[in-house]
Image (cartoon, rainbow, N blue to C red):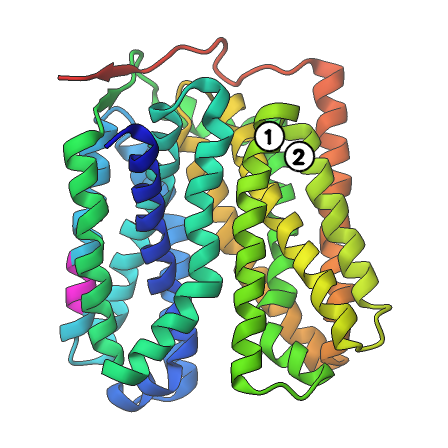
Amino acid sequence: MNNKWVVYLLALSVFLIGTIEYIISGILHMVAADLDITTSSAGMLVTAFALSAAIGAPVVIAATIQVDRKKILLGMLGIFILSCFLAYFSPSFEMMLVARVIQGLSGGATTVIAMAVATRLVEVQHRGRAIGTILMGLSSSLVLGVPVGTFLSEAVGWRTLFILIGLLTLIPLLAVFARVPSIIEQKAITIKMQLSILKNKKIVLALAVTLFYIGGYSTLFTYMAPFLQANAELSAAVLSGILLLFGLCSFAGSKLGGVIADTRGPKFAIYAGLSLQAGMLLLLTWANGLIYALIPLIMIWMVATWMTSPAQQLYLVSLVPRSPDIPLSVNTSFIQFGFAFGSAIGGQVINSFSIDNLGWAGFVMVLLALLIAVRLFAYNNKSGHETVYGDYEKPNVCTD
């Protein structure tokens, strides 16, 4: 097994983690009935995972920054597997909530470390592709993992799904154990140095770009099914087919974004992705509910959104090359916050106006992200592109 396949198996772990995170949204009624709670209370299981991943993952990364990345990755994967079994056996809502917090903490940390490790397993000029591959796992969990998981939950029960995911996670765990070398930083990085990245103006602006473009994405994507249904009478089979098509577009976007970031640079890829996103969202507001116009516009929008992500991650890695785990973990937190923020904005738009106005809300948020990106790269041109900690130093990779 070469390193390319190890990266793909790391992407599989992210796919499984993403599926566990988002599947609850599709089986809320089952969970609520089984645990004898209200649907709104069951929704807290989604929030618990997101907040645990957003807040807990950076803490884990910062606290273990001088520990062998292979050991931490194995530990987080192992904890995630155990949390899946805990969810299966949870007799009460409270215990299930604890399981979700542990899943969010371990899953969020695994996602970040997997991206960082992937950049160490490939040549420098292929780092963008490696990040794009890992992100394909996340994008596929959103569009493929959830519907497949929902179907399996209907067939074998929602608790069994957690056991299946836990067992499948053993595959990437064994691959990491067998094929990932020890990865240790050559130079110690203090807590003060870690926290200092949030004082860096370029990193703060980059994180703001993440928050707003993911927020714009979540504003529409969270309500994609009712948005499409509001513009056409679609059967369940047709709707599933459309969502699958969007999923394929997210795959293509992740891969394309990694390639463009490597060949043309992250700045070009970020500009292109954000501009396409804003343009497609604006055109959605002028489509007058024509489903045959909406579908291709959303397809391009999905490609544009997911091609932005690897470029954004690669840009952040370039700012802190000696410790990519730190900016990637913070950015992952902002992705989670962006999902929560966008979903809330979308809900307010639907309640105050109509579901047809989601395109406008998403457009405004992505436009803000684009304007912040312009400011970010103008600052780069003025001050010069420099890393937070100075020149790049390769980590100590032990092959024994």
Q: Note whether 31 is above or below 387 in the view shown.
A: below
Q: Which residue is mark 1?
A: 261
Residue at the location (75% across, 66% down)? 359
Residue 369 appears in the figure: yes
Tell me the amino acid under the disc marked 2.
Answer: Ala
Most common secondary structure along the magenta stretch? helix
Total number of numbered discs in the rendering: 2
Per the image, the residue denoted by label 2 is 269
Work out whether mark 1 precedes mark 2 in sequence or the reverse, and give the earlier one. 1
Dot 2 lies on which element?
helix
Stretch in magenta: 82-86
Q: How far apart are the alpha carbons under marks 1 and 2?
A: 6 Å
Asked which secondary structure carries label 1, the reply is: helix
Q: Are marks 1 and 2 in contact (CB under 8 Å)?
A: yes
Q: Is residue 358 left or right of residue 196?
A: right
Q: Report x, y in % for residue 180.
A: 22, 29
